[in-house]
Amino acid sequence: MADVTYREALRLALDEELGRDRDVFLMGEEIGRFEGSYKVTAGLWQKYGATRVRETPISEEGFVGAGIGAAMMGLRPVIEIMTINFILVAMDQVINHAAKIRYMFGGKVGVPLVIRAPGGAGAQLTAQHSQSLEAWFAGCPGLKVVAPATPADAYGMLKTAIRDDDPVLFCENLVLYNLTGALPENGDGLVPLGRAAIAREGTDLTLVAHSYTVQRALRVADRLSQDGISVEVVDLRSLRPLDVDTVAESVRKTNRVLVAEEGWSTYGVGAELAARLQRVCFDDLDAPVERVGQAEVPMPYAKPLELAALPLESKIEAAARSLLAECGL
Amino acid sequence: MSEELTMPRLSDTMEQGTIGRWLKREGESFHEGDVIAEIETDKATMDFQAYEDGTMLRILVGDGESAALGAPIAIIGAEGEEVPADAPAAASANGDGRDNGAADPAPAAEPEAEAKQQAPVATATEEAPSDGGGLRASPIARRMADAGGLDLRTLAGKGTGPDGRIVKADVERALAGGVKPAPAARAAPQAAPPQPGEGDEVRELTPMLRAVARRMAESKATVPHFYVSSEIDMTRALELRAELNGALADSGEKVGVNDLIVRACAQALVQHPQAHRSYVDGHHVYHSHVHVGIAVALDDGLIVPVLRDAETKGVRQLAAETRDLVKRARDGKLRQSEIEGGTFTVSNMGMFDVAAFSAIINPPESTILAVSSTVERAVVRDGAVVPRKIMSVTLSCDHRACSGADGARLLQTVKRHLEAPTLLLA
């Protein structure tokens, strides 16, 4: 199959799942006639009609709540939140209801709901529209949180998420939508949740990332390879459940680890991994676990300041080089 | 209660510092804000001020000696206070329980025994500790040493990690029989030094020379340089300078050729934004102000103080600020903020009777102008051979930031402004 964009991979997964299972339906703002703000639902309203591709008013709390209710009754709603920043008005529904219902109903009722939401920064959308909030949700038991970095994973993980019996927050990234890549030729292409992937093999340093930062990490690995430094890039793919085993296995090989993420470092994905790795890999480490994230500020509007705040390749590379320098490499 | 003073981070790129000199000797007291030492970083000599009132109890790193960032450099405390016996040992022995012994019900004999054990360590700072307990080694280094039957104490003081931490590479080398196994492809920072010839002297680089070596090597290796050269007729500019200096004779001010060049460059950079931008991480950063670095040669090395907002300043102000910066550069008195943030550099070797040279770009700047000597030459003007004062210049450009045409246009404007120097006043 020819390469497809990340956007098209998502569209294809939605299309196939809508076609496969009559319980699957979509809900969100302008996802029908307008085909979604980022065109992920292109053509689906025409194909499946307004009952299964439902347009909602601007009312995140309302339609996430409606999705939870539908899921409790056995449907499989896939909700698009235009950007992850807008999920904040629906926090009570996500954290207090979607994540808690299976527990509070004694396991008798689940919420097979998927919430898709793009995040990320870099387009001067400034403080309120440039956030990477996935780590907030990844800290909440009862939710699954995934953040694929390639078209194949976007396709395979969205399908798996839709078939999952628990609520899944499916984090996309605005910069990733136009990334192209191949989809698997054979099989159903399903990708399990909770499994990291080795995006590039290496021996000197483990560089862990998720979502768009994986692409940055791969470019950093390329640059460092020109200096003979071999970097292994681990794509987490899922943040909850977090596949510490795959990361640990890599760290046992490289003895050094740097975690990069687009969100703030404090209490972030790197913080969680550092805590887990210092225990499972204590005797394997040659240097303290290092992390790189967005500057601890609301994302500025001005381009030079935005660039200064972003965890760009230059920052990841500098952190990698400094960590390796500590180890005499 | 005594405490350790540690090597402070005085610049972003600083990895270690050298004590220029201590201004407070052992036993001397000081107040908050007093300068207690001068510390040389990779870029400048900086004053190290006391955070609070106190007395210098013990100096751990003497004048001219270096220490890594965060390493203890002195013990301070109250006047007349005894330095705890275990004070200068590594961070692991920081005297738990000794200072608040009165409140601590621990048996009195214990701290004494501890003090006896550690007393020799205090005097023999260079020797390996008698047991491995105080050794700093990364966990994987310990595990590999264990597995390989290597006594880590044999590597004490030879660790290449932060604060002398023994890291995996050190153990690998030791296990391989002391031979550095660095792969040929990798540019190891500690490549085997060339064997000095008989009578040769090997000297450590000063932090500043190390920074110059690192930055220049990095620039030449990673920035795609290209060069644009031109000859500028300085006859009229020199006349203008003579006239200006004549008029300023009473005030003691003096304008140099370099000030005129800086003025011309600042004007030209404003006119040519494509030659005044940096390539950073796949983006072009357009600079809104012209901050001109002036390369100043020192006895051994160089430093580049920065004239900020040069586009807003006339030649007199540029001259006055340059004079001040150059003097303080030679005295090692520049502040960190005065040697960073440049967007363009002028390197002027005119005083050395240089016919032509090209300079290495100072990243993230994308251009640097190399200025050679002005010499009187016979040139053809309107069909006649006339003597003119000619200065040759070479602009080095980062091809990721600007094209050949961008560089040429910038240089053309500089030339036009210097050859018709009334433009410098506009």
Image (spheres, coloured by chain):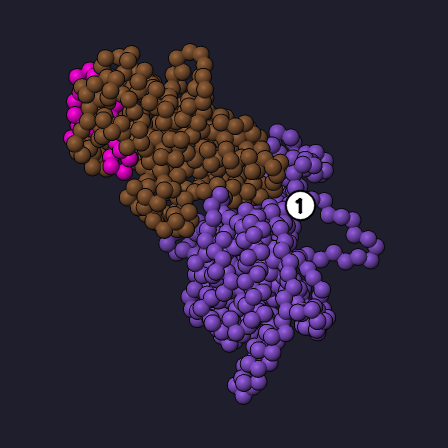
Chain colours: A brown, B purple
| Magenta span contains residue A80 | yes
| Magenta span contains residue B186 | no
Quadrant where the N terminus of chain A sits is: top left
The residue at 71%/64% (across/down) is B355
Please tell me which residue lies in front, A263 or B326.
B326
**Mark 1 crowdedness (10 Å alpha carbons): few <14, some 14-19, many ≥20:** few
Image x and y of residue B57, in percent: 52, 65
* Left or right: B389, with B38 as reference point: right
- Residue farthest along the front direction in this orientation: B383
The residue at 30%/24% (across/down) is A42
Image x and y of residue B373, in percent: 68, 68
The residue at 39%/39% (across/down) is A262
Image x and y of residue B85, in percent: 53, 57
The magenta-colored residue range is: A62-87
Quadrant where the C terminus of chain A sits is: top right
Q: Amino acid at mark 1?
A: Gln
- Residue A319, can we see it? no
SS state under label 1: loop
Image x and y of residue B274, in percent: 49, 53
Please tell me which residue lies in front, B229 or A175.
B229
Label 1 marks a residue whose chain is B
The residue at 62%/36% (across/down) is A228
- Residue B232, can we see it? yes
Please tell me which residue lies in front, A18 or A67.
A18
* Left or right: B337, with A147 as reference point: right
Please tell me which residue lies in front, B358 or A127.
B358
Residue designated by label 1? B190
Q: In the figure, B209 relative to A17: above or below?
A: below
* Left or right: B171, with A106 as reference point: right
